[in-house]
Image: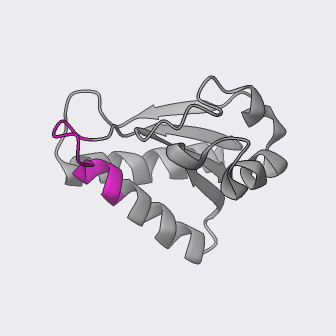
């Protein structure tokens, strides 16, 4: 099954609305058997890191602790020269073919579901 993309930037939502969407999408995708997800959260219009990016990664940290997701990798570490990148590709080898592999894209996060 292909990687599903969740675009949290679309429509420029507030952080709360974006996190509601992310929770709902992750839950739905888990139920239907999707394994890999790419979240597009952007880096923030100020160039110093966006609130949606930070909130998304915090939500994913919480879900990892609760064992709701298997793993996640920030886009800036999603590549062959980073341990996190190599580890997530071991869990889901198809991610190696993702166009963002090795591009150090701060505006995305890759997730592997349980």
Image point (40%, 65%), residue name: 58
Image point (57%, 77%), residue name: 65
| Residue 82 can be seen, yes or no | yes
Residue 18 in picture, x, y percent from top left: 28, 46
Residue 111 in picture, x, y percent from top left: 60, 49
* Start-end of magenta stretch: 44-55
In the depicted structure, whether residue 71 falls above or below residue 96: below
Is 52 inside the magenta-drawn segment?
yes
The answer to which of 92 and 47 lies nearer the viewer is 47
Please tell me in which quadrant of the rendered image residue 99 appears. top right
Image point (40%, 48%), residue name: 22
User: What's the coloring here?
Assistant: one colour
The answer to which of 109 and 6 lies nearer the viewer is 109
In the depicted structure, whether residue 96 falls above or below residue 74: above
In the image: residue 15, left or right of residue 23: left
Please tell me in which quadrant of the rendered image residue 100 appears. top right
| Residue 113 can be seen, yes or no | no
């Amino acid at each position: 099954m292909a990687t599903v993309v969740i675009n949290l930037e679309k429509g420029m939502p507030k952080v709360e609305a974006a996190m509601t969407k992310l929770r709902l999408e992750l839950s739905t995708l888990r139920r239907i058997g999707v394994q890999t997800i790419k979240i597009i959260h952007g880096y923030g219009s100020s160039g110093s890191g966006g609130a949606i990016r930070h909130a998304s990664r915090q939500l994913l940290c919480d879900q990892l602790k609760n064992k709701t997701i298997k793993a996640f990798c920030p886009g800036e570490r999603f590549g062959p020269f980073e341990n996190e990148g190599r580890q997530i590709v071991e869990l889901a080898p198809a991610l190696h073919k993702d166009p963002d592999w090795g591009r150090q894209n701060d505006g995305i996060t890759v997730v592997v579901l349980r």
